[in-house]
Amino acid sequence: MTPDKLKAIIAQKEGTEIEFKESKDNLARKVYDSICAFLNRRGGHVVLGAKDNGDIVGINPAKVQEQIDQLAKDMNNPQLFKPTYYLTYEPMDIDGKNIIYFYVPESNQAHSYKGIYYDRNQDGDFELRSTEQIANLFIRKSKMKTEDRVYPMLGMKDLDEEAFEELRRGIRIENSNHPWLNLSNEEIIRSGELIAIDPETGKEGLTLAAVLLFGNSHAIATALPAYRIDLLCRVNDTELYDDRELLSCNLLKAYPIMMDFIKKHLPEQPYIEGIQRFSLRDRILREVVLNLIIHREYSSAYPTTFTIYRDRIVTENWNIPYVYGSINLQTMRPHRKNPKIANVFSQMGIVEELGSGMRKMFKYTPLYANGKEPIIEEQDVYRIEIPYVPTLQGTTQKSTQKSTQKSTQKILDLIRVNPYVTTQEMADSIGIIRRTVAKHIKSLQEKGVIKRIGPDKGGHWEVVEG
């Protein structure tokens, strides 16, 4: 490291990969928190002899070697650092002041300092306190990704034939000469590296990626009993919802259902680019949906949600962070978290080159949202917010009105067949929640379409005809 290069680093100020400590006369003990955090995250630069704002204050010349010796000793002490780690420290002169510089690389192991695991974000170092946070650190450091977990008790009999047909339909549209079109189901699974040997038992089985992509309900419940994707429309009823789809099917079935839900509730906006005409809504939201299912950390039971509000779409899923904090085109670091799952979608031409989805979100969202940009936050929960123009909600309002009309008509039909039908029986028959049925009944009563004869218990309904 040269003084000029170090000055350029210092000029960037503290952040996810840069840390300053004064250490004028004594070694700043907090430096070990930062070293541990950098090892556990993605590495970083440390400068001893600088204030938090980057101003160089220098280290007492008589203390420079003493601090280097102390660093080397402590980093090699298993009572302090587990596992220990060797670093190289450089004493340097910056504008006539002594500093110590060293670079901490990202480690392939999880490290603790005095029994505490640390991680790093834009605000600095923080302790990992919960069991789940520490478990996620070890998962991130593990060479085996969650999607590669093997289930020896599951085989081809546990996969869904319709999912394979969905895959072939998608491939055929993209490339009618694709080699997978001539393969059997098992050959596709093996070609996609979705069958592996369990290192613990030595037996062959389906990977979690195979189960998620192609599994039937039994296989998914066996491998991931808490797996769900919750689709919500909260345009009018923000406390509950206007519409909901709760998915527990495989990803190849879930993807088109999610896209249909989007088309049902979000306004269309055609756009012409060159000679190509396409839907801004579909171009943006396809990338959001793919991000939601391809980059999710499936080891967690945290619910994955896709929610449509009056002026924005918000998605949340559990995540093993690679970049902490806000993500934009400058800070993004493309990193495919489930490459086997992504590969299957790429065979259908749905997933393109790494990072292209993010670029599309930032390119097209301002066109769809009257200049507003997407908001993307990567923490333990990965959150995307896509704004859109509220005045373009005719499609959503019409679909909501149509859904309400269908429900109220079904309520009237049920009452005509059985005047003593209960609110809960109506809800079960229609497939909506009891609270929504109660709202429809109240509206019908206020309009004089139905009336209650007798008490709430023991009475009955009557449709006022004509």
Image (cartoon, rainbow, N blue to C red):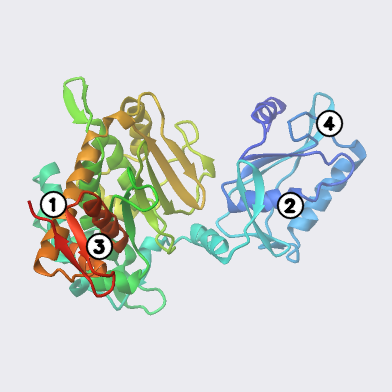
Residue type indicated by callout 3:
Cys
Q: Is residue 324 above or below residue 240?
A: above
- Distance, label 3 to label 4, CA atoms, is 60 Å
Disc 2 designates what residue? 32
Secondary structure beneath dot 1 equals helix
- Distance, label 4 to label 2, CA atoms, is 20 Å
In the foreground, 276 or 8: 276
Q: Is residue 416 above or below residue 62?
A: below
Residue type indicated by callout 1:
Pro
- Distance, label 1 to label 4, CA atoms, is 64 Å
State which tag comes first along the sequence, 1 or 3: 1
Disc 1 designates what residue? 179
Disc 3 designates what residue? 249
Residue furthest to the top in view is 274
- Residue 34 location (% of width, % of height): 69, 48
Disc 4 designates what residue? 57
Q: Is residue 269 among the parts visible in the rendering?
A: yes
- Residue 298 location (% of width, % of height): 39, 61
